[in-house]
Amino acid sequence: MSRSGVVQSGLRARVLSSVINAPTTLPPPLELPSRDRDTGLFRHLIKVGKAYLGFYKAGARQVMTNRRLSKQIKLVMSDRTSISIPGDAVDHLTGKVIDSPKPPPPGLPPRLTRSEFQLVRRHAADLKKLAPFAVLFAVLGEWLPLFVGILTPILPGTVLLPKQIKSRRLRRAKIEVASGDVRAEAARLGVVSRYLAPVYPRGWLETRLDRHRRYLLQDDRLLKEWWKGGSESVAGSGYESELDSAGRQRSSDGRQGEVADEDLSNDELELALEERGLWKEDRSEEEMRRLLRRHVDSLEDKVD
């Protein structure tokens, strides 16, 4: 199958391998060596340092890979206004309302899949952070993990260590949000740092929150579309892929929502809950999936 993004026979070739997950926007696996009795401390530290170096290099390469993929997606969806979710004319990168959205070019689908939507959006944020990370990596090298606790906000999402992600989620989950407390809500949803939230003007925070809510609304609609049945999601996106037959099987067995739900990776699941202020420690995967599904359904009921 072509990966060039060229439109063929009224359908477009699939740029990403997944319709709902965007794994290249998440950190690569980190495998730290264990120390046995015969390995000295210095030699062990060298191995650990090499493991971190490999992790950071892989994460940086993912940013560049996502740059290429993002360009391919935008090349196919050449008109940015056509990328918006139907019924919600909002630019997927800026969150701004499009006053007079143009119809999509002939032969192109009217929207992105969730994986494409998330890749373009996350890469846009990561690209802005790549230069600071490159400087830090050049200066600190394998010592960078010692300082990451205070550097998380300025690092691309593909180079965040597991402990950084866990610490960030724990901090946000502890923030109590009272009714009308814009600053606390912005900090809990990750719109701004909780330390900087009191500094920003309320109006600016409300604008950022509104943009974040628009993003979540689009993501909710894409998730619900997939849970309704993989075949509908793929066909509606103009895909020419083997996922069409897989989707029909989901629809025929009467459990399309449950099966599609399982296709959302655990990493994507936790990130989705975090972005919505719903993440809590020690929840089972089943509980998390049920919570996200209930949240998405409730929001859709309000806007339909």
Image: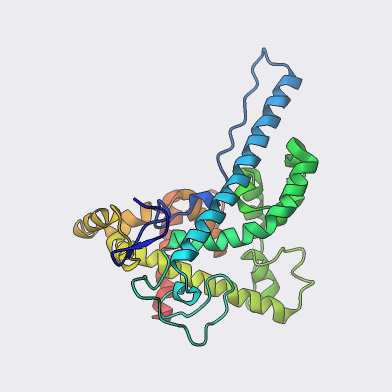
Residue 111 picture location, percent across and down: 41, 70
In the picture provided, is 182 more to the left or to the right than 118? right
Residue 64 picture location, percent across and down: 59, 50
Looking at the picture, tell me which residue is in the foreground, 29 or 243. Answer: 243
Q: Which residue sits at x=80%, y=42%?
A: 139
Q: Which residue sits at x=55%, y=73%?
A: 213
Farthest residue to the bottom: give it: 100
- Looking at the image, residue 297 lies above or below residue 31: below
Looking at the picture, tell me which residue is in the foreground, 282 or 35. Answer: 35
Residue 150 picture location, percent across and down: 76, 51
- Looking at the image, residue 62 lies above or below residue 107: above
- Looking at the image, residue 216 lies above or below residue 133: below
Farthest residue to the top: give it: 38
Residue 105 picture location, percent across and down: 39, 76
Q: Which residue sits at x=21%, y=59%?
A: 254
Res. 131 image quadrant: bottom right
Q: How many marks?
A: 0
